[in-house]
Amino acid sequence: MASPLDLYVSRLLYDYDCVIIPQFGGFVSNYRPARIDEKLGIAHPPAKDVRFNRNLSKNDGLLAQACANVEGWSFDEANDYIRQSVEKYLQDLNQGVKVKFKKIGVLYFDDHQNLRFEPSNDQNFLKASFGFEDFILPPAVAQSSLHSHSTEVSESPSEQKVVVPISDAPREILESDQSTRGIYWVAAATLLPFIGLSLYVALVTDFKSPSDITLADLNPFATAKEIAMRYTPRINSESAIAPVPHHAGFPENTAIFPFSFENQRIDSNGVWVNLDKATLPKPINKTSDRGKLYHIIAGCFGAEENAHKFVSNLNDQGHDAEILDFHKNLHRVRLRSFEDYGTALVALESARNSGQFPNAWLLKKPLS
C-alpha cells in the first residue's frame, strides 16, 4: 500500500523550500530566525515558516520523482497516484471537509469560500535546528520586589547603613575621564604614524594602484630619473591577455601578453605576442651581431611564418630586424642589439616614443 501523499511532502520540505502538488498548489517555506515570545516567556529556535500558494500548481517533477523512488514506480505511475490524491483533496474541500497534511497544516474553505491554510506548529523543517526545542525562560525578578526587599533589610536594627561621601562621586567621574583621555592619546599616537606614511606613499607614488607600487617608489633618496628607468617584472599569467588593434605590421590575432621571458624586467606596456599555435622548435639563424648582450624585442610569435612576415615588414621600413631565437614556443624578433646597457635603454625609449613600438622591451642575453 502506498504511503499518504502528505508524507512525501513533509519529507521534501526538509530539503527544499518549495514542494508543488501538481494541479493543486505548493507549500513554500521561508527561514525564520530565533525569537523570544515576551508575553509567554518562551524562546523559539530558528525554523521554517510554511505557507500554501494555490497558484504554484505546475508539475516540476519533484514530488513525482520522490514517490517513484520510494514506491518503485515509473514516473507516469507516480503522476497517476498524485492525480488521484488531488481529486480526493478537492472533493473533501468542496464538501466543506478540512484536509489535513500531517506535520504541515490544515487546508479548508472559510465562510466566504476562500481557501485558508493553518500551519502546524509541532514540526520544525529547518535541519540546522535539529534537536532544538522551545523552552521557557526563567522568570525575571520584579524591580519593585527587589527594591522593597532592600528597604526592609536596611530598616533592620541589626544592620547599619553605609553612607558614601558626596566628595567620592566627582573623584570617580574625574578618574574615569582621565582614563578615557589616556586611551584617546594612545590611540592617536598609534594612528598618526600610519596616517602620515599613507599620505607620503600617496604623494610620492602619484596615487598609483597598490599593485604598481614597488619598494623603489618608497625610497626618499631615489632620483626621478632612476625610477623612470626602472622596468618592473611582470607575472606569468595567461588570464592577463589583452587584445590590441592591428597596426605597425603585426599580423592579426596579436595581443599584449604580460609575462617575463627568463625573468627579464618588462614594464607595464607588456609584450607583443602572436597567439597562433607554435611550430615545432628548429634551429634559428642567430644574429650576426656577435658579442652584443642587450636586444630590443619588437614582438614574439608562435608561428614562424608570422615572425618572418613581421621581420620582412620591419626591414621594408628601414629597420635591421631579425629573428633572435626560439624560446618557450615563441619566435622572438629583435629590432636592434647593443653592447652597452645605457645605449640600449636610450634606443628602447626612442623606439617606444616613436609610437610604432609602444610595447617593445629589452632582453639581456649573451649570444654564442
Image: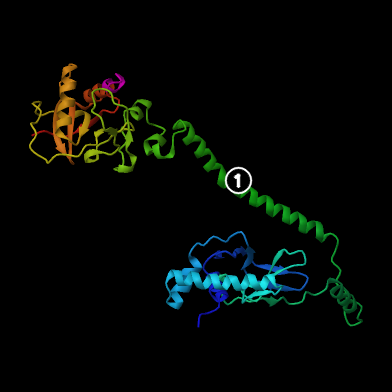
Stretch in magenta: 350-356
The image quarter in which residue 278 lies: top left
Q: Position of residue 210 (x, y in %)?
A: 43, 39
**Relative to the observer, which residue lies in front, 366 or 173?**
366
Residue at 38% of width from left, 38% of height from top? 214
Quarter of the picture holding the C terminus: top left
Residue at 58% of width from left, 77% of height from top? 131
233 left or right, relative to 183? left
Residue 352 among magenta residues: yes
Residue at 48% of width from left, 31% of height from top? 203
The residue that mark 1 highlights is: 188
Q: Amino acid at mark 1?
A: Ala
Task: Determine whether 264 is above or below 124 in the image.
Answer: above
SS for dot 1: helix
354 left or right, relative to 61? left
The image quarter in which residue 195 lies: top right
Task: Determine whether 145 is above or below 346 in the image.
Answer: below
